[in-house]
Amino acid sequence: MCSQHCYQYPRPAVTTDVAVFTIRDQRLQLLLIQRAGEPYKNRWALPGGFLDIEEGLEACAKRELAEETGISGVYLEQLYTFGSPNRDPRGRVISVAYYALVPSDRLQLKAASDAADVQWFALDLLPPLAFDHQQIVTLARRRLAAKLDYSTIAFQFMPKTFTLSELQAVYEILINERLDKRNFRKKILALKEIEAVAELRRTGNHRPARVYQLKNPERVDIIK
Amino acid sequence: MCSQHCYQYPRPAVTTDVAVFTIRDQRLQLLLIQRAGEPYKNRWALPGGFLDIEEGLEACAKRELAEETGISGVYLEQLYTFGSPNRDPRGRVISVAYYALVPSDRLQLKAASDAADVQWFALDLLPPLAFDHQQIVTLARRRLAAKLDYSTIAFQFMPKTFTLSELQAVYEILINERLDKRNFRKKILALKEIEAVAELRRTGNHRPARVYQLKNPERVDIIK
DNA sequence: TTGACATTGTGTATCTTTGACACTATGGTC
DNA sequence: GACCATAGTGTCAAAGATACACAATGTCAA
């Protein structure tokens, strides 16, 4: 018996999956959802799902991300396409993987109803993941590290306004290394990507910090 | 009436396409095939075709490349996945694009029978291409240019053995700029990726050149 | 055989970039 | 007003990148 959609040759199913990173509690963290159904029931997995037939790939990634986690309007970039014949026990499934970066002031996940099954995890304490999702995460982490060196991608983790110390903390977490304050500020300001705003930020009993914002918040530039 | 393969939800077709580059006649060139059937009949297009249901993505790219052009055993890397809903008039088709680099001593294409429809084109003199293939080519060219700076990818254009002058000529073509001979040699030799072989190369009435080969011919290293 | 030719192969000096390093400025709190 | 905590600032040295010119070698022809 035939289902509704029939083709002369067999076709793989196509999904998108998204590795969503943020910086939370001074750590690089990844957003996972707990699978409700088979296969890999109850395992944690990347948000994602099947491509609608009339929908662009990036649109699918954005839609699934919004539906499953409530996140939208964040930096999103295609990562790699995974298509091992055996990566999904249900049959042939091609996954176009994306990664996304969420600023630390946008961590609120979707409505409490099923918030239990959406959760941030520190990247070095991930639970076992469904499918080949660990592979996707590893590749995304590598790409992120590489792009730090030659692009302004790290700015995508920042809220609209931030201090240079906050920015430095983000870089330090991402590369897992301490940086020299003076050299860091020199290098960042030389990029001419950020500008000071009028306001100062006072947090605690010490000198307040200047506050900066991106000149082109959406844009990620290739530098050097 | 149903064809043989039926699914509950509609599925896109999945193809791979490959942008194959080489250096020929002192120019960067691209391999194209002329389409025999509709759509875009008689237009030039990238080699590629539909994914077999049991076949890995890279395997598909390699198979199509071998079938359509006779080329195999060359450097091949996944580039990007294109999936605009309207990129193919036949319906929804996702294309996983690859790019490949062919050494200049392996330019012989497949058997003469249909050699007429497989041809090298200088990259700056491409005919109009089918589908969104021009977009794929443009992206591949950009990736290639970027990788020149931070990897040893250019070596993949070289035959097994080559002189430093030949290598320099390849770099000059790729970046479209003259390079200083002494600085170039210094930088290349510092990579420790190539070693001299015993032989010398004599071509013309002048001093013969030392001949080098890659220490790890398959490998492309990230440098710096 | 020797001189002209064409290309190979080599070193140094300068400039630019990167990295190391420590103290003063400012506002809050007691 | 003294103490505390973090913000903010400049210089010197090392390393890396760039500019630059001539001697070495084999072929060919006279």
Image (cartoon, coloured by chain):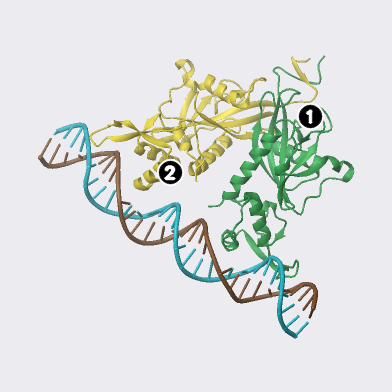
Chain colours: A yellow, B green, C cyan, D brown
A68 is higher (above) or lower (below) than A202: above
* Residue located 70% across and 60% down the image: B162
- Name the spot of residue D30 as percent of width and height, x first: 79, 78
How packed mark 1 is, by other alpha carbons closer than 10 Å (few <14, some 14-19, many 20 or more), is: some
- Name the spot of residue C24 as percent of width and height, x first: 21, 47
Position of A96 with respect to A71 (left or right) is right
Amino acid tagged 2: Asn
Q: Quadrant of the N terminus of chain A?
A: top right
* Residue located 65% across and 33% down the image: B81
The one of A3 and B60 positioned closer to us in this rendering: B60
**Share a chain, discs 1 and 2?**
no
- Name the spot of residue B198 as percent of width and height, x first: 70, 69
> Is residue B103 among what the camera can see?
yes
The one of C4 and B107 positioned closer to us in this rendering: C4
Amino acid tagged 1: Tyr
Q: Quadrant of residue B121?
A: top right
Number of marks in the rendered image: 2
Indicate the chain on which mark 2 is placed: A
Secondary structure at badge 2 equals loop
* Residue located 71% across and 34% down the image: B133
Residue carrying label 1: B40
* Residue located 61% across and 52% down the image: B177
Residue carrying label 2: A176
The one of A141 and B197 positioned closer to us in this rendering: B197
